[in-house]
Image (cartoon, grey):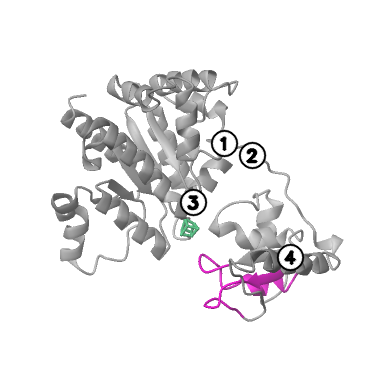
Amino acid sequence: MPCAPAALASSLRRGVPPAGSFLNQELAIVTGAVDAMVVDVQCIMPSLANVAACYHTKIITTMPIVKMPGAEHVPFTLATADADAERIVRIALEAYRRRDPAKIAIPQAKSKMWGGFSVEAILGALRAVNAEDPLKPLVDNIAVGNILGAVATVGCNNTKVVQDRAHVELVKALIKENVLVVTTGCSAHALAKAGLMTPEAANYAGPGLRAVLSAVGQAAGLGGPLPPVLHMGSCVDNSRVADLVSALAAYLKVPVKDLPVAASAPELQHEKALSIGTWAVALGIFTHLGVVPPVLGSAQVVKLLTADLEGLVGGKFYVETDPHRAADGIIAHLRAQRRKLDL
Ligand code: SF4
């Protein structure tokens, strides 16, 4: 493979930010400013060591089941974590000395974001509105329709579709209809790059949602509205979303399957995304997929996933590749859920 891969270098010249999701990992190296990249077990491009070989960058693997030619292996264990981390930093420092100034190209594209909305942080913000009963403001605003419902957008980028488009267009369409969005994983990267995790993004929200975001932001002393898209962590942090949904269900004394909530993986790609999606469906959550999973070989499996599962576990998959039609389908589901709760 020739060095300075042309397509990647030209992406950087066009100002594509190297920080980002799964799909941006090679671009980070092509800045020439990465001294070491540490990987563990998944979502690692097989080409990484080849790209890094064109630069001073060291690729470091850490898990016994993932080693690759051209990478340096530093076994990482919890018991030896400090020493392992020091060894990795020393490798990076050594590589730094070999940086080639002629190859450094750091794009100037920047985007602000507010992150760190764990369940505790969300409840903390709501506690500023009602210290004794923090979920009440959220539930009350759902009940009166200021918030139509909540959707978690999760999952990957997928090379079969235009990067980030489905994530961003779907979420803009949802918040415009007063749907509160929480997000994790590569979906969060897409939405952060689009500026949707800032107080200013509340301007994209419908009037009801915007009023709630402003009131909570003011009460919590944030100096502006809460972002309409709350970043809850990486794709292995979806359990936080489940904790929030379960707390809401317990508060309302209804099963999760009856809440006006949904999940969406607009660009699913990784097998982990499919298993997380199946887990969401098993929790009783209506789960949108924006890329058709490889199940069309069996009509029986398709029927089970998109219809019959609902009768068994309460949730089901909803497949729609167009983000605007997907937003319509999700909103129709939220409205139907509200009707079931007499809202
Ligand atoms: S969201 Fe998908 S691509 Fe991104 S890290 Fe998770 S599994 Fe990998």
Residue under label 2, please give it: 111
Q: Tell me which residue sits at (35%, 60%) in the image.
A: 274
Q: Secondary structure at mark 1?
A: loop
Residue density around tag 3, few if under 14, some if 14–19, many if 20 or more, within 10 Å:
many
Residue under label 1, please give it: 195
Determine if residue 270 is in view. Answer: yes
Please report contact status of discs 3 and 2: CB closer than 8 Å, yes or no: no
Q: Quadrant of residue 102?
A: bottom right
> What amino acid is found at the position of numbered circle 1 in the picture?
Gly
Residue under label 3, please give it: 185
Please report contact status of discs 3 and 4: CB closer than 8 Å, yes or no: no
Please report contact status of discs 1 and 2: CB closer than 8 Å, yes or no: yes
N-terminal of the pair, mark 3 or mark 2, is 2
N-terminal of the pair, mark 2 or mark 4, is 4
> What amino acid is found at the position of numbered circle 3 in the picture?
Gly
Q: Tell me which residue sits at (73%, 60%) in the image.
A: 34
Q: Tell me which residue sits at (48%, 60%) in the image.
A: 159
Q: Quadrant of residue 337?
A: top left
In the picture, which quadrant includes the N terminus? Answer: bottom right
